[in-house]
Amino acid sequence: MSVIPNSTALITGASSGIGAVYAEKLARRGHDLILVARDAARMNALAERLRDQTGRSVEVLPADLTDAMQVAKVAQRIAQAPGLGLLINNAGMALSGTLSTSAQGDVERLIALNITAPALLARAAALRFAEQGSGAIVNIASVLALAPEMFEGVYSGTKAFILNLSQNLSAELGPRGVHVQVVMPGATRTEIWARSGTDVDGFPPEMVMDAGDLVDAALIGLDRGETVTIPPLADEAGWEALNRMRLALVPHLSRRDVAPRYAAG
């Protein structure tokens, strides 16, 4: 296993959806929890139920991760919480329109929540886990990181950032005893759709995964030590081939001379 048994897990976006499912499944695996989200009432209800059902310690840490000072508060908790061994970087949002039709403030909040907060919290966890020589960081991205044409571009761009960040952190931190996993869901039945004004029931039913199934698959991937986990992808060879092609391009992407196809005249 790549996760320290019985360590404390901090989960963002823990009041509902994927984050709440992670909380339940990790508590049943024997982990104490720190739940982070804006909705304190829902987290308190979840925490009370999990304490009763599992006997685990569950701390509620209300925070709006679009606010820099509150992100700093959570980062400090990551640095100081006793027994912390796992960060689930899950909190996120989508726009109700596109870049050109959404309000500037909505775009700013999305970038703050989907990019700035997870990067800073991953940094805090990386510093702590590298020093202690153990721990795991799980970042929730999306298959849209690989398919920007399918959905609104700012959201898919933030998920491409999470994918890139995770792959780099994995290379950096793996030799220091820290495992990094990026989970790439497809369409998943959570509240993010209603919040962005989209009816998830408008998708073909075979496209939409249950959040419980998603997290079960993600945890199996984590147990196996995967860096990239794509729960809906049946044939792993597809991702492996794409990654090989990407890596094969790398030696050709930075050269002194302009490629002949761009040479003037």
Image: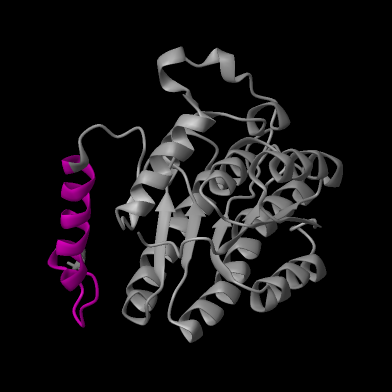
Place residue 237 in its image quadrant. Answer: top left
Place residue 253 in its image quadrant. Answer: bottom left
Left/right placement of residue 169 relative to residue 22 reads left
Q: Nearer the viewer, residue 142 or 216?
A: 216
Left/right placement of residue 262 relative to residue 200 reads left
Q: Residue at x 35, y 59 (%)?
A: 1
Majority SS type along the magenta span? helix
Horizontal and vertical percent for residue 38? 80, 49
For the C terminus, the image quarter is bottom left
Left/right placement of residue 215 relative to residue 125 reads left
Q: Is residue 148 visible?
A: no
Q: Check residue 101 for magenta coloring.
A: no
Q: Residue at x 56, y 62 (%)?
A: 87
- Residue at the outermost right position: 41
Q: Answer above or below: position of 125 versus 197.
A: below
Q: Nearer the viewer, residue 43 or 160?
A: 43
Horizontal and vertical percent for residue 108? 72, 55
What's drawn in magenta, residue-wise?
237-260
Counting the numbered discs, the total is: 0
- Residue at the outermost bottom position: 131
Left/right placement of residue 197 relative to residue 256 reads right
Horizontal and vertical percent for residue 224? 29, 53
Q: Check residue 242 for magenta coloring.
A: yes
Horizontal and vertical percent for residue 177? 37, 77
